[in-house]
């Protein structure tokens, strides 16, 4: 169980926030024709804004078809859809823009996008 100095419960949310404590970025998730801008400040999601957007500003975008995202967010994802980098390798996910922050905090973004799936999948 991961714990932080300020968190005695060891919750997964606290671990994720601690892991992303230096992440300040706005990125886009494109799910087919749907777009979502996600703004992060100190590891917290401060805005999750569905599109359409007029001239959106983002650092990087994770772009995949709706079917690919549904497979990724499944309770037990199939091989090739179990991980963001597996999806990149098999060309079902594209990382557009500047991938520096994404790659520097890859474990954080893998877990964050997995958790955001519940919110985005419900829309």
Image (cartoon, rainbow, N blue to C red):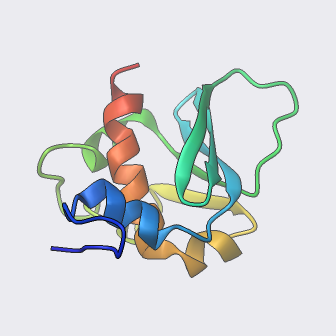
Q: Residue placed at 33% from the left, 66% from the top?
A: 15
Work out whether residue 84 can be spotted.
no
Viewer-closest of 112 and 68: 112
Q: Residue placed at 60% from the left, 40% from the top?
A: 46
Q: In what quadrant of the picture does the C terminus appear?
A: top left
Left or right position of 76 against 56: left
Left or right position of 35 against 57: left
Q: In what quadrant of the picture does the N terminus appear?
A: bottom left
Viewer-closest of 4 and 69: 4
* Residue 69 drawn at (x, y percent): 37, 42
Q: Residue placed at 70% from the left, 57% from the top?
A: 25
Position of residue 103 relative to residue 78, above or below, is below
- Tell which residue pokes out farthest to the left in this image: 76
* Residue 50 drawn at (x, y percent): 60, 24
* Residue 51 drawn at (x, y percent): 66, 23
* Residue 14 drawn at (x, y percent): 34, 60
- Asked where in the image residue 17 lies, by quadrant, the reply is bottom left
Left or right position of 94 against 108: right
Position of residue 77 relative to residue 97, above or below, is above
Work out whether residue 44 can be spotted.
yes
- Tell which residue pokes out farthest to the right in this image: 55
Position of residue 37 relative to residue 16, above or below, is above
Number of residue marks:
0
Q: Residue placed at 33% from the left, 47% from the top?
A: 115
């Amino acid at each position: 169980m991961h714990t932080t100095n300020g968190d005695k419960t060891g919750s997964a949310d606290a671990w994720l926030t601690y892991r992303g404590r230096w992440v300040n970025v706005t990125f886009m998730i494109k799910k087919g024709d749907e777009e979502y801008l996600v703004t992060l400040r100190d590891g917290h999601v401060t805005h999750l804004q569905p599109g359409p957007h007029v001239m959106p500003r983002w650092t990087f975008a994770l772009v995949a078809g709706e079917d690919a995202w549904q497979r990724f967010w499944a309770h037990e994802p199939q091989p090739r859809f179990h991980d963001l980098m597996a999806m990149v390798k098999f060309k079902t996910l594209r990382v557009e823009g500047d991938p520096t922050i994404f790659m520097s905090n890859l474990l954080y973004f893998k877990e964050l996008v997995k958790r955001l799936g519940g919110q985005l999948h419900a829309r």
